Image (cartoon, grey):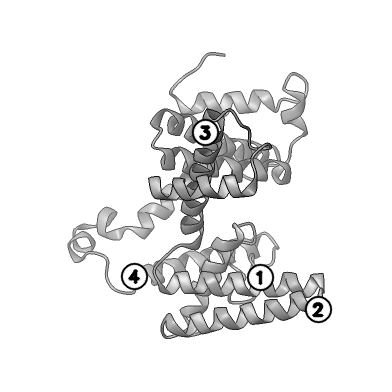
Amino acid sequence: MTPSKDISRLVEIMAALREPKTGCPWDIEQDFSTIAPYTIEEAYEVADAIARGDLDDLRDELGDLLLQVVYHAQMAQEADEFAFGDVVQAITTKMIRRHPHVFGDETARSAGMAKGMWEKIKAQEKAEKRQARLARGLDPEDNGKGFLDSVPVALPALTRALKLQEKAARVGFDWSEAAPILDKIEEEIGELREALAKGQTAEIKDEFGDMLFAVVNLGRHLKLDSEAALSGTNEKFRSRFHYVEQALEKAGRTLDEATLDEMEALWQEAKSAK
């Protein structure tokens, strides 16, 4: 087995790793549910490489993410459900269908993407998917029967909150502007204070979640993605804390030896330096 730029080689490697008698014991033991966390992790590592501007890492992380797709497809093929080629066909069909202004006939291309066309295409896809599930004897409502049930549960919580709010807003369940949401956040903070005073863990958790949900809603109205905003703050915190760490090291001290007042003073220096 030798490396190759041909995707078929990766498919062959994955099949060999899953071969019951000669494959890798760890790979053979896996199933969709055990591999799913790795798939999510690899997607985050792709995003991290992009954020760092490291194109060498991006190449490698994209490969790791591609492996996840091939892995799931191999397991599906073993179950006689679908193969990697079917995955490719499904996405190419979807991309061509969703871009008639690019791949359609001359009339469609010259007309551009007509208003309402996207919704029409999505509705057609949903109807076809429903019929396919019915033909297999499955519940046609694959993601649940509620209006918001199509928002994946596995999304990061902040992102899922945003998606839920966006979808509810499509049918008018939304604030008209951002200002009242600040009042809502203050209301939720007040309820959190009350829960803290009672010392009831379950209620504290519930009120804390309500507060976060309201903050995500504010971010949405401000045209901000809460996940992206928090990622930026996380990196800012990491960078400033590293400044504190380096400053202490130059002074011959460690983080464990430093007092809170010392670290706070260096933290303020880090804020001024950036």
- Single out the mark in the foreground, 1 or 4: 1
**Can you tell which quarter of the image residue 58 is in?**
top left
The CA distance from mark 4 to mark 2 is: 53 Å
Q: Residue 87: x and y, percent?
A: 52, 44
**Observer-nearest residue: 226 or 123?**
226
* Mark 3 / mark 1, whichever is N-terminal: 1
* Mark 4 / mark 2, whichever is N-terminal: 4
Q: Which residue is mark 4?
A: 117
- Residue drawn at x 60%, y 69% as measured from the top left: 212
* Mark 2 / mark 3, whichever is N-terminal: 2
Q: Which residue is mark 3?
A: 246
The CA distance from mark 3 to mark 1 is: 36 Å
Q: Could you tell me the amino acid type at mark 2?
A: Lys
Q: Could you tell me the amino acid type at mark 4?
A: Met
**Few, some or many C-alpha atoms within 10 Å of disc 1 (few <14, some 14-19, many ≥20)?**
some
Q: Which residue is mark 1?
A: 209
Indicate the secondary structure of the residue bearing disc 2: helix
**Few, some or many C-alpha atoms within 10 Å of disc 4 (few <14, some 14-19, many ≥20)?**
some
Q: Residue 199: x and y, percent?
A: 81, 73
Q: Using the image, determine if residue 45 lies above or below residue 144.
A: above
Q: Could you tell me the amino acid type at mark 3?
A: Gln
- Single out the mark in the foreground, 2 or 3: 3
The CA distance from mark 4 to mark 3 is: 56 Å
Q: Using the image, determine if residue 49 lies above or below residue 12.
A: below
* Mark 1 / mark 4, whichever is N-terminal: 4
Indicate the secondary structure of the residue bearing disc 3: helix
Where does the N terminus fall, quadrant-wise?
Answer: top right
